């Protein structure tokens, strides 16, 4: 079974802190994705990556950056956390056929005070 | 642009009731269609999928048929259980090389015993 793990289930940070969210997948998938999930807004894509050291902006990249130094790991970085970044963050991975299922991690619920 | 529209929730049903959650899409080309489910406190997981017109996806008693003529992929189950309480997301991908998923906003389902 595909496994996608996220470093934390719950995080509490203060405004202005730099926050790292880590995601690791064990299926040698090329594609990895970061979403945030908010009530009434569904899932919104923040960034995605097709390959090591490659990244593409999603729909809401402002205030975020990403890093993909190894194929299995995709990190989301909040350079200076703000209260409007309080959310559920979901990581996913997939293969590259164009019709692939995305496999999701359990999510990180981030609270920024 | 490409989009997915699904019925707003919450949907509340009694156990053993018949379930339909409507989903329609707008897409250029020939999308693959998915239903994902998110149980409380968890990430999303694939429930079923269909990759071409008239295909029927099925899993755990749920079914959905890819209807190209009506651009729909409605989710159905003949007899729901309390354990089906979750948020259901309709989604599509296009074989255009970026492997992004376009999600609907999700429908929360409550099943009463």
Image (spheres, coloured by chain):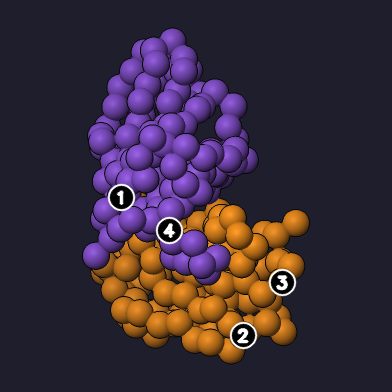
Chain colours: A purple, B orange
Mark 3 lies on residue: B29
Mark in front: 2 vs 4: 4
Residue A9 coordinates in the image, percent (x, y):
26, 37
Residue A99, relative to residue A88: is it above or below? Answer: below
- The span from disc 3 to disc 1 (Cα, nearest Å) is 30 Å
Are the residues under badges 2 and 4 in a single subunit?
no
Q: Mark 4 belongs to which subunit? A: A
- The span from disc 1 to disc 2 (Cα, nearest Å) is 31 Å
Are the residues under badges 3 and 4 in a single subunit?
no
Residue B15 coordinates in the image, percent (x, y):
31, 75
Image quadrant occupied by the C terminus of chain B:
bottom left
Residue B92, relative to residue B19: is it above or below? Answer: above
Sequence-wise first label, 1 or 4: 1
- The span from disc 2 to disc 4 (Cα, nearest Å) is 23 Å
Mark 4 lies on residue: A94
Mark 1 lies on residue: A25
Which secondary structure, mark 4?
A: strand
Mark 2 lies on residue: B53
In the figure, is residue A110 to the left or right of A50? Answer: left
Could you tell me if the residues under marks 1 and 4 are in contact, i.e. CB atoms within 8 Å? Answer: no
């Amino acid at each position: 079974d595909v496994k996608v793990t996220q470093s934390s289930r719950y995080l509490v940070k203060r405004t202005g802190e730099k926050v790292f969210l880590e995601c690791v997948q064990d299926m040698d998938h090329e594609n990895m994705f970061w979403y945030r999930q908010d009530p009434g807004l569904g899932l919104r894509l923040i960034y995605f990556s097709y390959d090591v050291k490659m990244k593409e902006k999603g729909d809401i990249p402002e205030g975020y950056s990403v890093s993909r130094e190894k194929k299995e790991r995709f990190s989301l970085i909040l350079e200076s956390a703000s209260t409007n970044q309080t959310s559920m963050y979901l990581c996913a991975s997939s293969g590259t056929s164009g019709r692939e299922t995305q496999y999701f991690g359990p999510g990180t619920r981030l609270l920024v005070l | 642009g490409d989009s997915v529209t699904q019925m707003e929730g919450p949907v509340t049903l009694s156990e053993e009731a018949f379930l339909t959650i409507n989903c329609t899409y707008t897409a250029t080309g020939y999308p693959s269609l998915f239903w994902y489910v998110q149980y409380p406190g968890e990430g999303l997981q694939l429930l079923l999928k269909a990759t071409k017109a008239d295909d029927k996806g099925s899993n755990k008693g749920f079914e959905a048929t890819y209807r190209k003529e009506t651009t729909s992929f409605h989710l159905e189950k003949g007899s729901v259980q309390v354990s089906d309480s979750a948020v259901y997301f309709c989604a599509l991908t296009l074989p255009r090389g970026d492997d992004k998923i376009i999600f609907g906003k999700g429908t929360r389902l409550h099943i009463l015993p």
